[in-house]
Image (cartoon, rainbow, N blue to C red):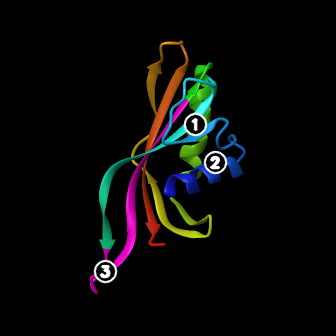
Amino acid sequence: MILNELAADLAAASLGTVGTNIFVSHFPLDPSNILSLHDQIPVKPIRTMAKRRDHEVHMVQLIGRDTGHDACEAKVRAVYTRWDMFSGTLSSVRYVIILAAGSPVYLGVDENKRFRWSCMFEVRRAES
């Protein structure tokens, strides 16, 4: 669910089309130029003093792949700039804050000589 909301935001930012070059929990061999979102390490939800869950916490990895090094880096950095310190509503759900866990990193090339970049985000999302 959270990954679908984030993918829809990438599409709204004109960074691609979900299912065509933006993928959720899937890293297909084709096409060459993609953004892929993956839910990583589970994190305990944040609870209030009243022992109620206030919001959930996810670690989300974004992986970009492109035939051009600079194009791949630019697309991942565009997402980094868009999401780091974001607080607001996506798909009618309140996002407490999205924080980059670090700067985008170069992952090297794949077996087809396509460039890969990645960035991790801590996503704090209101209970839905």
Q: Amino acid at mark 2?
A: Leu
Q: Residue at x 40, y 43 (%)?
A: 102
Q: Are dots 1 and 2 in contact, CB under 8 Å?
A: yes
Say what secondary structure mark 2 lies in: helix
Q: Which residue is mark 1?
A: 35
Mark 3: secondary structure? loop
Determine the secondary structure under disc 1: strand
Instruction: Give, as a three-letter code, the residue at label 3.
Output: Thr
Q: Quadrant of residue 78?
A: top right
**Amino acid beneath label 1:** Leu
Q: Earlier in the sequence, mark 1 or mark 2?
A: 2
- The local crowd at label 1, few if under 14, some if 14 to 19, many if 20 or more residues have their Cα within 10 Å, is many
* Residue denoted by label 3: 48
Badge number at residue 116: none
Q: What is the tally of numbered marks visible in this picture?
A: 3
Disc 2: CA contacts within 10 A as few (<14), some (14-19) or many (>=20) = many
Q: CA distance from mark 3 to mark 2?
A: 31 Å
- N-term-proximal mark, 3 vs 2: 2
Among the two numbered marks 3 and 1 on one chain, the one whose residue lies closer to the N terminus:
1
Callout 3 crowding tier (Cα within 10 Å): few <14, some 14–19, many ≥20: few
Q: Position of residue 114 (x, y in %)?
A: 55, 18
| 111 left or right of 90 in image | left
**Residue 74 or 17: which is nearer the viewer?**
17
Q: Is residue 59 magenta?
A: yes
What predominant SS class does the magenta segment belong to? strand
Residue 4 to residue 104: above or below: below
Magenta range: 47-64
Disc 2 target residue: 10
Q: Is residue 49 above or below residue 127?
A: below
Percent across and percent down for residue 91 are: 62, 64
Q: Residue at x 58, y 44 (%)?
A: 79
Q: Give the x, y percent position of residue 66.
A: 60, 24
